Amino acid sequence: MVYIENEFLKVAVNDELGGSLTSIYDKKLNQERQYQPVEGSWSGQDVVIFPFVARLNGTYKVGDEEYSMKNHGLARYHGFETVKNNGEELVLRFAFDENTLKEYPYEFVLNVTYRLDGPSLEVTYSVYNPSFKPIYFGLGGHPALKIDEDENNEIKGNYILFPERTKVVKMKLDPTFSYIVGEEEELILERIDLNRDLFRKEGTLMYRVNNLKECVLVRKNGQQIRYEFKNNAYLAIWTNPTKGDYVCVEPWTSLPDYLDAPKEFSEKKTLIGLSPKLTYTMSYKMNF
């Protein structure tokens, strides 16, 4: 585990597995702001999603070769190298090797930067293509932040606010909540009231948001966390439909597989294509 800290927050990151957040401790309030796993709910806390968001519909191909990847790609299952830690900014690195090439036959360097700025934590993902051919990938965050849960495991009273009359496109999922079916619905989002029934019915809320810059998570107890986004085309919102005092507000560059997705990886809808020797960056910020 590695740490960064300032007068407002102390942050822990698991560099040994996944390079993801495990604790955001609010020193002013003397309380944990990140979900801590409980039995019967999600065992995770955050995911550095790379190089594919959520699930592939079976195996995929690159040329004549066939491959498979687990849910949310590779990064969550590997250790990260610490490149920099000055106490308030941490840079972790995950790069291709002979093992990653067996599951994902592209060369890459993924840097994840965690930077404290007063009572705010900024997370930046940068993907560099060191090879001489294009690479294709999806990228995203999955931080689970605490919300209020009552004695019946209900989360009513927590909600998410969007800028006035935010235009989005809702993506419809198949009955297993795993794959995109291709149907889309244009919506105006202003507020999402969180409750278990919503996630039993929808699984994960997925929206194409294009230029959405921010939203605000409002807890039942009145606490607010303002999210800022840069360079993510999609936003997902998820929590366990049964129990757990958290919600994940997830900025993504791409979507899970479509039911009718082609096997060829480079032909999959919404993936980022990155030319040789270039870098792609996306980020989000949580203001506590």
Image: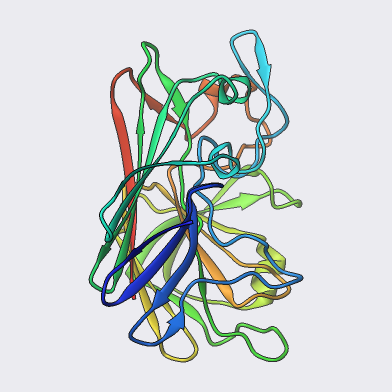
In front of the other: 86 or 75: 86
Q: Is residue 282 left or right of residue 243?
A: left
In front of the other: 194 or 76: 76
- Residue drawn at x 56%, y 47% is 17
Which image quadrant for residue 288? bottom left
Residue 272 coordinates in the image, percent (x, y):
42, 31
Q: Is residue 108 above or below residue 251?
A: above
Q: Is residue 186 visible?
A: no
Which image quadrant for residue 238? bottom right
Outermost residue on the left side: it is 118
- Residue drawn at x 69%, y 47% is 178
Residue 86 coordinates in the image, percent (x, y):
25, 54
Residue 253 coordinates in the image, percent (x, y):
43, 43
Residue 137 coordinates in the image, percent (x, y):
47, 31
Q: Is residue 260 visible?
A: yes
Q: Is residue 151 above or below residue 181?
A: below
Q: Is residue 229 left or right of residue 176?
A: left
Q: Is residue 107 above or below residue 3?
A: above
- Residue drawn at x 57%, y 36% is 74
Q: Is residue 137 left or right of residue 121?
A: right
Q: Is residue 176 left or right of residue 167?
A: right
In front of the other: 138 or 173: 138
